[in-house]
């Protein structure tokens, strides 16, 4: 009796004649389905469309289920030169935002049989350094934040597929990019404050060489300069509450009109500004309005709660991983920036009459 007929009569399928393993093989599945081993590989590798019929594909899947066949992914990946592992490079995991990016990216990767190796910067902010001595041999691709872009020379060279997050679409090492619509979000902040009547602004800017922060500064200046009678002062700071506190204190003591609205590149920076204002006896928003970016938990822990841009970090990570998987498959990733949302809370109001 042939192996196929035996497998229908026993709870544990036997293998085809000549096999040296007790486990069913792709040859067994091919014999059970009456197709070639190449057809089995196409169907179980989900590459059958346009190459075998739907009826044949279902027959292969049914045979694999009946035989309890499990493909040897390690051997398959070795043949293909794949590890099914990608690297996610972020500046830090000490912030909720990048933790969310990882969560979204890892979820999509897992759905497609990939693992994610995470490499944050040891310093918490800025470029990560040398995560692997031989990354090209250990990885299939790289997903990287522009804030950690300096690490890519050591990690990628010119040999690994790359997708950049929050990066210039026209100058990101020739890589595909996935961006939040931070330009639109910055304009929304400016329009909200202008609509309340503010004309004197302070921008507490992250002192990090990154495309996303350059966009925020440019869009804010462009929007405010279009309205007569506005002033804009910019002060740079490390991405810390203490840094923002010191920068805001210096800016508030500078000559010229005192700002009635402070635009911060990050919610943590806004927390530092709150402290600087209170040290001077100024109230939010009665004396000075304050805005942030990210909408992390800190935004609602502040008193008053912070008006900020909500960035969907998990969705950002998901889109980034989908883009990298498309690149690995030779497809063009979907285009279009991810929308952001202005969340108006108690930290913004109309300025006091002059």
Image (tube, helix red, strand yellow):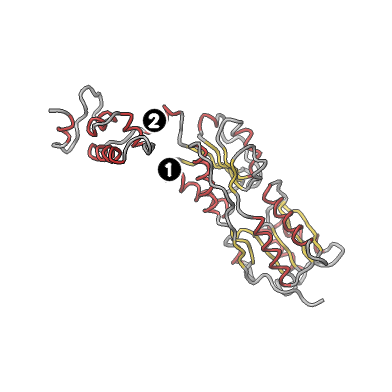
Q: Residue furthest bottom?
A: 353
Q: Say if 235 sits above or below 88 in the image.
A: below
The crowd level at tag 1 (other Cα within 10 Å; few <14, some 14-19, many 20+) is few
Q: Residue 212: percent from the left, percent from the top?
A: 67, 50
Q: Residue at x 30, y 29 (%)?
A: 37
Q: Residue 175: percent from the left, percent from the top?
A: 60, 39
Q: Is 105 displayed left or right of 6 in the figure?
A: right
The quarter of the picture where residue 2 lies is top left
**Reading the chain from its start, which is encountered first: label 2 or label 1?**
2
- Answer whether labels 2 and 1 touch (C-beta < 8 Å): no
Q: Residue furthest right?
A: 255
Q: Is residue 140 visible?
A: yes
The tag on residue 76 is: 2
| Disc 2 element | helix
* Inter-mark Cα distance, 2 to 1: 15 Å
Q: As rendered, which of 340 and 289 lies closer to the eye? A: 340
Q: As rendered, which of 259 and 192 lies closer to the eye? A: 192
Q: Is residue 23 visible?
A: no
Quarter of the image with the N terminus in it: top left
Quarter of the image with the C terminus in it: bottom right
The quarter of the picture where residue 234 lies is bottom right
Pointer 1: what residue? 112
Q: Residue 24: percent from the left, percent from the top?
A: 25, 31
The crowd level at tag 2 (other Cα within 10 Å; few <14, some 14-19, many 20+) is some
Q: Is 176 displayed left or right of 109 in the figure?
A: right
| Disc 1 element | loop
């Amino acid at each position: 009796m042939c192996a196929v007929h035996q497998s229908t009569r026993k709870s544990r399928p036997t293998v085809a004649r000549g096999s040296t393993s007790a486990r069913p093989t792709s040859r067994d599945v091919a014999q059970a389905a009456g197709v070639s081993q190449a057809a089995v590989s196409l169907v179980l590798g989900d590459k059958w469309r346009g190459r075998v019929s739907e009826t044949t594909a279902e027959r292969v899947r049914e045979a694999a289920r009946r035989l309890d066949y499990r493909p040897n992914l390690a051997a398959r990946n070795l043949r293909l030169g794949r590890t099914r592992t990608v690297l996610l490079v972020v500046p830090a995991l000490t912030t909720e935002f990048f933790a969310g990016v990882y969560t979204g990216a890892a979820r999509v990767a897992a759905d497609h049989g990939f693992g994610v190796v995470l490499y944050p910067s040891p310093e918490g902010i800025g470029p990560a350094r040398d995560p692997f001595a031989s990354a090209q041999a250990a990885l299939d691709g790289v997903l990287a934040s522009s804030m950690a872009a300096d690490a890519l020379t050591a990690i990628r060279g010119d040999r690994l597929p790359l997708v950049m997050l929050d990066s210039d679409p026209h100058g990101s090492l020739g890589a595909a990019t996935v961006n939040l619509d931070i330009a639109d979000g910055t304009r929304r902040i400016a329009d909200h404050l202008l609509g309340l009547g503010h004309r004197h602004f302070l921008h507490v800017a992250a002192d990090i060489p990154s495309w996303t922060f350059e966009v925020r500064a440019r869009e804010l200046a462009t929007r405010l300069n279009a309205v007569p009678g506005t002033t804009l002062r910019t002060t740079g700071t490390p991405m810390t509450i203490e840094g923002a506190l010191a920068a805001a204190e210096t800016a508030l003591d500078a000559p010229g009109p005192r700002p009635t609205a402070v635009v911060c590149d990050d919610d943590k920076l806004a927390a530092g500004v709150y402290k600087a204002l209170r040290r001077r006896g100024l109230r939010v928003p009665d004396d000075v309005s304050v805005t942030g970016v990210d909408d992390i938990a800190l935004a609602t822990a502040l008193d008053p709660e912070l008006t900020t841009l909500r960035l969907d970090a998990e969705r950002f990570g998901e889109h980034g991983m989908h883009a990298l998987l498309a690149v690995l498959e030779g497809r063009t990733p979907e285009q279009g920036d991810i929308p952001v949302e202005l969340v108006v809370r108690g930290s913004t109001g109309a300025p006091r009459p002059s």
